[in-house]
Amino acid sequence: MQIQVGIVGAGPAGLMLSHLLHQRGVESVVLDTRTREEIEGTIRAGVLEQSSVDLMVDTGVGARVKELGMVHHGIELRFGGKGHRIDFADLTGGRGVTIYPQHEVLKDLIAQRLADGGDIRFGVSDVQVEDVTGDRPRIRFTQDGTEHELDCELVAGCDGSRTSTRFLIPAPNPRQDHFRQYPFAWFGILAEAPPSSEELVYAHHRNGFALMSTRSATVQRHYLQVDPNDTVEDWSDDRIWSELHTRVAGADVKEGPIFSKSVLHFRSFVCEPMQHGRLFLAGDAAHTVPPTGAKGMNLAIADVHVLSRAMAEFFANSDRTALDAYTATALPRIWRAQHFSWWMTSMLHRMPEATGFDLNRQLAELDTVTRSRAGRTLLAENYVGTPFE
Ligand code: DHB
């Protein structure tokens, strides 16, 4: 089968790319090894930047996020037993973020692609991308026991942090991997309870970081910094609530039955360049951020915003200029998000070897950021995200 763009991966990057390409008259096939049910049922991040929501609305996939998403115009930083509000609306000229789970974004994109006659192959296996430096790259895969071949003009590697497509860019030349590991993890829970506060609370505490987030009026999402070797069995419900009460001291933590527990590992990663021949990486296949600040899904969307335009220009005018510039165009935003996620992480988490000096230095940094309008503005502008060019 011949197709303009073969897309490996039906996550936020792959599905949004397919949707944006279709809007620009470019047809694609999306492949994923997971089933539709797995993709639509996996709990991930939940915060959309204003630009991500705007792009969904402007391209016709925004009805549900507008109806069900919760717009937040601020967050609270809590340290030393007190809350300090960062007022996004006031500091960024009315911008905000929307709480809307990633799997709901995926449901919206899948429904729209299928309504538009899009081709998404779920549950495929043995995906192999070949000849990306030639004129006609191929993707071989197996579906329902039958081998298939996609004859593509361009290939997009949107296969997430467990990517295989990234490794088609030879290392160390040209591919350079920039990597940082953190000595802690997040323990994430979902609980049936009313919201503990109107806005997200990011708490610094000598026991470690805690974050209170939300999913709906009846489901809350909370995270605790834990040892990266901890497992779900190490954390009883009682231990979780007790630790949340301690770390988010002074807030009214509302308890309820916990129905999901998981451990999230922390990494910062960027691969450069994000392209090789006719292969282009987007989203977690090319970069990972630690979750503090919730940039992951937004970066994937920003990547494919750039990539879809460059691909459309290639097909419309046989002009590779924008495609050749893809990495250079996408990277500055990616590194800004890397810096922001690293900054929020290092300001709020306890390092295992932290001394009294380190804890007091962090409190002074939080005090500096929250007492100055310039400090709050820096945080707010980065949290709501910079507009797309
Ligand atoms: C959520 C995750 C984050 O990493 C964050 O910074 C805020 C909220 C969430 O899953 O709700």
Image (cartoon, rainbow, N blue to C red):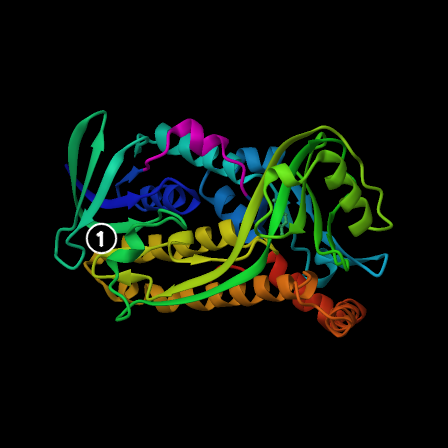
Q: Which residue is mark 1?
A: 315
Q: Crowding near pointer 1: few (<14 within 10 Å), some, many (20+)?
A: some
Snapshot quadrant of residue 218? top right
Answer whether residue 10 is magenta in the image.
no
Image side of residue 117 versus residue 61, left or right: left
Which of the two residues, 205 or 79, is positioned nearer the viewer here?
Answer: 205
User: Callout 1, which amino acid?
Assistant: Phe
Q: Secondary structure at mark 1?
A: helix
Residue at the top extreme, as displayed: 144
Image side of residue 248 versus residue 278, left or right: right
Magenta part of the chain: 32-44
Which of the two residues, 305 or 124, is positioned nearer the viewer here?
Answer: 124
Q: Residue at x 37, y 28 (%)?
A: 115
Image side of residue 346 versus residue 4, left or right: right
Q: Position of residue 43 (x, y in %)?
A: 54, 37
Q: Position of residue 259 (x, y in %)?
A: 64, 29
Which of the two residues, 260 or 25, is positioned nearer the viewer here?
Answer: 260
Snapshot quadrant of residue 131? bottom left
Image side of residue 171 versus residue 190, left or right: left
Q: Position of residue 276 (x, y in %)?
A: 24, 62
Q: Residue at x 68, y 66 (%)?
A: 347
Whether residue 4 is visible, yes or no, is yes
